[in-house]
């Protein structure tokens, strides 16, 4: 993937299967995530520590280990923006966004709840999918740039998976 100024970038495909019950949607992969080609690749991002920690699991080191964790815990993972022009990692830098077609997941997985990781994810989802019958929740962004992160909000919403 090219990392020059505001070049078109493509996100990763969704991670889910026919057992996924909770769909977690971010906005768009950070520069570090794009470098490793998987979600929440910045070690400072709180996503993996929060979600794995909730279940008492160690954060897997490999992409395959992370995918295995998601499948075992019935979590689907994707981003609202599948393609855009962006410089850096900031959601504010996203231009000409192409949004995810969530029907790809809904046709296979019995999603019962959607967790939206951060303000942009929530806003984009609300603009396009607010009429869905599946309950959805704005979550505090796990980004290291978010000083108001609250792990307890995540834990409350993940309890349904226990």
Image (spheres, grey):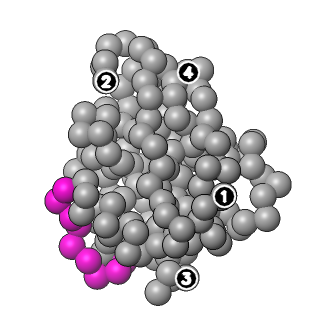
Magenta segment main secondary structure: loop
Do residues under tags 2 and 4 come within 8 Å of each other at their CB atoms?
A: no
Reading the image, the residue beneath label 1 is 107
Quadrant of the image containing the N terminus: top left
Residue found at x 67% / y 50%: 103
Circle nearer the viewer, 1 or 3: 1
Alpha-carbon span between mark 2 and mark 4: 17 Å
Mark 1: give few (<14), some (14-19) or many (20+) Cα within 10 Å.
Answer: few
Residue 89 appears in view: yes
Residue found at the very far bottom of the displayed protein? 162
Reading the image, the residue beneath label 2 is 1
Asked if 35 appears above or below 153 in the picture, the reply is above
Alpha-carbon span between mark 1 and mark 3: 21 Å
Circle nearer the viewer, 1 or 2: 1
Residue found at x 47% / y 67%: 75
Residue found at x 36% / y 48%: 39
Q: Which residues are magenta?
A: 54-62
Reading the image, the residue beneath label 4 is 95
**Image spot of residue 33 (x, y percent):** 30, 40
- Mark 4 or 3 closer to N-term? 4
Residue 152 appears in view: no
**Image spot of residue 121 (x, y percent):** 58, 46
Mark carried by residue 56: none
Instruction: Report the side of 35 relative to 133 (left or right).
Output: left
Reading the image, the residue beneath label 3 is 160
- Mark 3 or 2 closer to N-term? 2
């Amino acid at each position: 993937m090219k990392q020059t100024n505001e070049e078109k970038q493509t996100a990763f495909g969704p991670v889910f299967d026919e057992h996924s019950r909770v769909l977690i949607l971010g906005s768009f992969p950070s520069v570090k995530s794009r470098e490793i080609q998987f979600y929440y690749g910045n070690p400072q991002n709180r996503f993996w520590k929060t979600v794995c920690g909730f279940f008492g699991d160690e954060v897997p080191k490999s992409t395959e280990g992370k995918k295995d964790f998601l499948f075992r815990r019935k979590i689907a993972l994707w981003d609202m923006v599948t393609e855009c022009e962006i410089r850096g990692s900031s959601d504010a830098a996203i231009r000409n966004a192409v949004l995810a077609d969530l029907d790809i997941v809904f046709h296979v997985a019995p999603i019962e709840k959607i967790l939206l990781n951060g303000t942009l994810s929530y806003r984009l989802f609300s603009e396009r999918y607010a009429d869905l019958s599946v309950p959805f929740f704005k979550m505090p962004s796990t980004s290291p740039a978010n000083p108001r992160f609250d792990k307890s909000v995540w834990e409350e919403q993940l309890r349904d998976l226990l």
